Image (tube, rainbow, N blue to C red):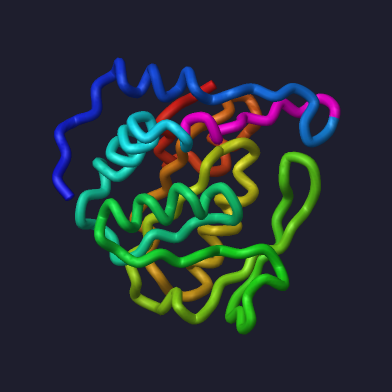
Protein backbone atom coordinates (compact mmCIF):
# COMPACT_ATOMS: atom_id res chain seq x y z
CA UNK A 1 0.00 0.00 0.00
CA UNK A 2 1.17 3.51 -0.75
CA UNK A 3 0.82 6.08 2.03
CA UNK A 4 1.77 9.70 2.38
CA UNK A 5 4.40 10.33 5.05
CA UNK A 6 3.11 10.26 8.63
CA UNK A 7 3.22 13.66 10.32
CA UNK A 8 5.40 14.34 13.32
CA UNK A 9 2.29 15.48 15.21
CA UNK A 10 0.62 12.10 14.60
CA UNK A 11 3.70 10.24 15.82
CA UNK A 12 4.02 12.51 18.87
CA UNK A 13 0.40 11.77 19.69
CA UNK A 14 1.01 8.02 19.30
CA UNK A 15 4.07 8.16 21.57
CA UNK A 16 2.05 9.95 24.24
CA UNK A 17 -0.24 6.91 24.42
CA UNK A 18 2.53 4.55 25.58
CA UNK A 19 2.12 4.02 29.33
CA UNK A 20 5.02 3.49 31.76
CA UNK A 21 4.32 0.92 34.50
CA UNK A 22 6.99 1.00 37.23
CA UNK A 23 8.20 -2.17 38.96
CA UNK A 24 6.57 -4.56 36.50
CA UNK A 25 7.12 -7.48 35.98
CA UNK A 26 9.61 -7.15 38.84
CA UNK A 27 11.03 -4.36 41.02
CA UNK A 28 13.32 -1.99 39.15
CA UNK A 29 11.86 -2.71 35.70
CA UNK A 30 9.66 -0.11 33.99
CA UNK A 31 7.26 -1.86 31.63
CA UNK A 32 6.25 0.10 28.51
CA UNK A 33 2.59 -0.66 27.87
CA UNK A 34 1.75 -0.16 24.20
CA UNK A 35 -1.85 -1.32 24.66
CA UNK A 36 -3.33 2.22 24.64
CA UNK A 37 -1.52 2.93 21.35
CA UNK A 38 -2.80 -0.33 19.84
CA UNK A 39 -6.36 0.48 20.93
CA UNK A 40 -6.29 3.85 19.16
CA UNK A 41 -7.00 3.23 15.46
CA UNK A 42 -5.40 6.47 14.28
CA UNK A 43 -2.23 6.04 16.33
CA UNK A 44 -1.84 2.37 15.44
CA UNK A 45 -2.38 3.02 11.73
CA UNK A 46 0.10 5.92 11.74
CA UNK A 47 2.75 3.85 13.48
CA UNK A 48 2.35 0.92 11.08
CA UNK A 49 2.68 3.24 8.07
CA UNK A 50 5.81 4.85 9.54
CA UNK A 51 7.41 1.50 10.43
CA UNK A 52 6.89 -0.05 7.00
CA UNK A 53 7.82 2.99 4.90
CA UNK A 54 11.63 2.47 4.83
CA UNK A 55 11.24 -1.11 3.57
CA UNK A 56 8.70 -0.73 0.75
CA UNK A 57 8.84 -3.85 -1.40
CA UNK A 58 12.21 -5.10 -0.12
CA UNK A 59 11.02 -8.24 1.68
CA UNK A 60 8.97 -11.42 1.20
CA UNK A 61 7.79 -11.98 4.78
CA UNK A 62 7.62 -10.23 8.12
CA UNK A 63 8.99 -12.21 11.10
CA UNK A 64 7.62 -11.22 14.49
CA UNK A 65 8.94 -12.05 17.93
CA UNK A 66 6.53 -13.47 20.51
CA UNK A 67 4.44 -11.99 21.97
CA UNK A 68 3.86 -8.28 21.37
CA UNK A 69 6.02 -8.40 18.26
CA UNK A 70 3.33 -10.65 16.74
CA UNK A 71 0.82 -7.82 16.88
CA UNK A 72 3.07 -5.38 15.06
CA UNK A 73 4.49 -7.90 12.60
CA UNK A 74 1.03 -9.19 11.68
CA UNK A 75 -0.23 -5.67 11.05
CA UNK A 76 2.87 -4.80 9.01
CA UNK A 77 2.53 -7.99 6.94
CA UNK A 78 -1.06 -7.05 6.07
CA UNK A 79 -0.01 -3.43 5.41
CA UNK A 80 2.70 -4.62 2.98
CA UNK A 81 0.66 -7.48 1.49
CA UNK A 82 3.26 -10.01 2.64
CA UNK A 83 3.30 -13.17 4.73
CA UNK A 84 3.96 -13.44 8.47
CA UNK A 85 6.37 -15.84 10.21
CA UNK A 86 6.10 -16.19 14.02
CA UNK A 87 9.28 -16.60 16.05
CA UNK A 88 7.97 -18.51 19.06
CA UNK A 89 8.98 -19.38 22.59
CA UNK A 90 10.18 -22.95 23.16
CA UNK A 91 7.47 -25.58 23.01
CA UNK A 92 4.88 -23.46 21.14
CA UNK A 93 5.52 -24.84 17.63
CA UNK A 94 4.58 -28.43 16.68
CA UNK A 95 7.68 -28.94 14.49
CA UNK A 96 10.42 -26.35 15.03
CA UNK A 97 13.38 -26.62 12.66
CA UNK A 98 15.74 -24.20 14.40
CA UNK A 99 16.11 -22.78 17.90
CA UNK A 100 18.39 -20.42 19.82
CA UNK A 101 18.82 -19.58 23.50
CA UNK A 102 19.09 -15.94 24.53
CA UNK A 103 19.11 -13.59 27.53
CA UNK A 104 16.30 -11.21 28.40
CA UNK A 105 16.27 -8.11 30.56
CA UNK A 106 15.11 -10.33 33.44
CA UNK A 107 15.81 -13.98 32.55
CA UNK A 108 16.63 -16.42 29.74
CA UNK A 109 14.49 -17.93 26.97
CA UNK A 110 14.60 -20.14 23.88
CA UNK A 111 13.17 -19.02 20.53
CA UNK A 112 12.13 -21.38 17.73
CA UNK A 113 10.98 -21.14 14.12
CA UNK A 114 9.15 -23.48 11.75
CA UNK A 115 10.10 -24.60 8.25
CA UNK A 116 7.79 -21.85 6.93
CA UNK A 117 10.85 -19.61 7.15
CA UNK A 118 12.57 -21.00 4.08
CA UNK A 119 16.09 -20.52 2.77
CA UNK A 120 16.37 -17.54 0.42
CA UNK A 121 13.39 -15.62 1.82
CA UNK A 122 13.93 -11.90 2.35
CA UNK A 123 12.81 -11.11 5.89
CA UNK A 124 11.86 -7.96 7.79
CA UNK A 125 12.31 -8.67 11.52
CA UNK A 126 9.89 -6.89 13.88
CA UNK A 127 9.52 -6.57 17.64
CA UNK A 128 7.82 -4.10 19.91
CA UNK A 129 10.82 -2.93 21.93
CA UNK A 130 14.60 -2.88 21.62
CA UNK A 131 15.87 -3.09 25.21
CA UNK A 132 18.91 -5.32 25.80
CA UNK A 133 18.81 -6.69 22.25
CA UNK A 134 18.64 -10.35 23.28
CA UNK A 135 15.38 -11.31 21.59
CA UNK A 136 16.18 -9.42 18.38
CA UNK A 137 19.65 -11.02 18.26
CA UNK A 138 18.00 -14.43 18.66
CA UNK A 139 15.60 -13.58 15.83
CA UNK A 140 18.52 -12.58 13.62
CA UNK A 141 20.29 -15.85 14.46
CA UNK A 142 17.17 -17.90 13.59
CA UNK A 143 16.80 -16.12 10.25
CA UNK A 144 20.46 -16.78 9.46
CA UNK A 145 20.22 -20.41 10.63
CA UNK A 146 17.41 -20.98 8.11
CA UNK A 147 19.43 -19.47 5.25
CA UNK A 148 17.04 -16.54 4.85
CA UNK A 149 18.16 -12.97 4.18
CA UNK A 150 17.56 -10.30 6.82
CA UNK A 151 16.66 -7.06 4.99
CA UNK A 152 15.89 -4.97 8.06
CA UNK A 153 14.99 -4.78 11.72
CA UNK A 154 12.31 -2.45 12.98
CA UNK A 155 10.82 -1.81 16.42
CA UNK A 156 8.18 0.50 17.77
CA UNK A 157 10.22 1.66 20.76
CA UNK A 158 13.88 1.70 21.77
CA UNK A 159 14.74 1.93 25.46
CA UNK A 160 18.02 3.84 25.52
CA UNK A 161 20.69 2.92 28.01
CA UNK A 162 19.97 -0.82 28.19
CA UNK A 163 22.64 -1.83 25.65
CA UNK A 164 20.38 -2.98 22.84
CA UNK A 165 21.68 -0.43 20.33
CA UNK A 166 25.22 -1.83 20.75
CA UNK A 167 23.99 -5.37 19.99
CA UNK A 168 21.55 -4.38 17.20
CA UNK A 169 23.09 -1.22 15.68
CA UNK A 170 21.05 -1.38 12.45
CA UNK A 171 17.60 -1.55 14.07
CA UNK A 172 15.21 1.22 13.11
CA UNK A 173 13.14 2.44 16.05
CA UNK A 174 10.08 4.63 15.61
CA UNK A 175 10.39 6.03 19.15
CA UNK A 176 13.26 6.26 21.62
CA UNK A 177 12.91 6.70 25.39
Residue at left offset 24%, top offset 57%: 58
Residue at left offset 16%, top offset 39%: 3
Residue 57 at x, y percent in the picture: 20, 56
Residue at left offset 77%, top offset 31%: 24
Q: Is residue 165 above or below residue 139?
A: above
In the picture provided, is 159 more to the left or to the right than 77?
right
Which quadrant of the structure image shows residue 99?
bottom right
Residue 16 at x, y percent in the picture: 47, 18
- Image quadrant containing the C terminus: top right
In the picture provided, is 152 more to the left or to the right than 141?
left
- Specify whether residue 30 is painted magenta: yes
**Along the line of sight, which residue is nearer the eye, 157 or 169?**
157
Q: Is residue 105 above or below residue 60?
A: above
The outermost residue toward the right is 27
Residue 103 at x, y percent in the picture: 73, 50
Residue at left offset 50%, top offset 32%: 157
Residue 173 at x, y percent in the picture: 43, 34
In the picture provided, is 156 more to the left or to the right than 107?
left
Which quadrant of the structure image shows residue 21?
top right
- Specify whether residue 122 is painted magenta: no
Magenta residues? 27-37
In the picture provided, is 38 more to the left or to the right than 82?
right
Q: Is residue 109 above or below residue 107?
A: below
Q: How many numbered badges does the structure rendering display?
A: 0
Amino acid sequence: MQHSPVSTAELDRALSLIRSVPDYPEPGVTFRDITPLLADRRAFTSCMAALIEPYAGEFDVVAGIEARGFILAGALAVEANRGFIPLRKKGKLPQPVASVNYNLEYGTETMEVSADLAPGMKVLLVDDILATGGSLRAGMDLIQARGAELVGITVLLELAGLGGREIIPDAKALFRL
